[in-house]
Image (cartoon, helix red, strand yellow):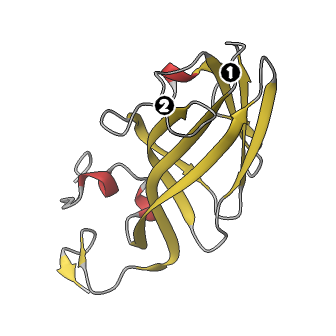
Amino acid sequence: MPGTYPLMLNQWVGLLPAVFWNRAKDPYIYGVDFLPANLTATTNAQLQINSDADFAAYYLTATYYAVDNTTVLAAPVFTLQIADAGSGRFWSNQAIHVVHWFGTGSLPYMFVKPKIVGGGSTLTFAITNLSGTAYNVRLALHGLKMYPFPETGYFNPLTMVNS
């Protein structure tokens, strides 16, 4: 029937494009560290997505430390631009202040729909420290690795049976 969708037992999987519904999946976290974020300069870090699976990012979190790695800081003043070399796309039209990108472990930033990154892609994170103070930045992308083979041994929402 037009306009209806299969019953989704997992609300997060239901947010994925249908082509990914029947793929084997694992929860996964990718991390990116800037140790330290340079003073009033733009620093790049690259994150290589494993080539064994595509990645669906659901949440973004960040932690900020003084350079001694013991003092947790409130969100420092820096901007961030993320580029996906695999697709050639930027995740925003310009560098955006970190408070608009990343939440905390207790209150993460959640994408409206999962951000799909192809297996083997490289994400480039460019941060510009606007504070004049060096600090360590640890970013995390939380989501699902989606393997190129079907899920087995689980309820299949497309066929409504166990496989």
| Residue 122 in picture, x, y percent from top left | 73, 53
In the figure, 158 relative to 95: above or below?
below
What number is the disc on residue 93? 1
Mark 2 element type: loop
| Residue drawn at the location 52% of the way across and 27% of the way down | 101
In the figure, 50 relative to 102: above or below?
below
| Residue drawn at the location 37% of the way across and 79% of the way down | 151
The residue identified by callout 2 is 102
| Residue drawn at the location 48% of the way across and 31% of the way down | 102
| Residue drawn at the location 77% of the way across and 21% of the way down | 39
Q: Quadrant of residue 65?
A: top right
What number is the disc on residue 122? none
Callout 2 environment at 10 Å: few (<14), some (14 to 19), or many (20+)? many
| Residue 10 in picture, x, y percent from top left | 23, 59
Q: Nearer the viewer, residue 31 or 81?
A: 31
**Distance from the alpha carbon under mark 2 to that under mark 1:** 17 Å
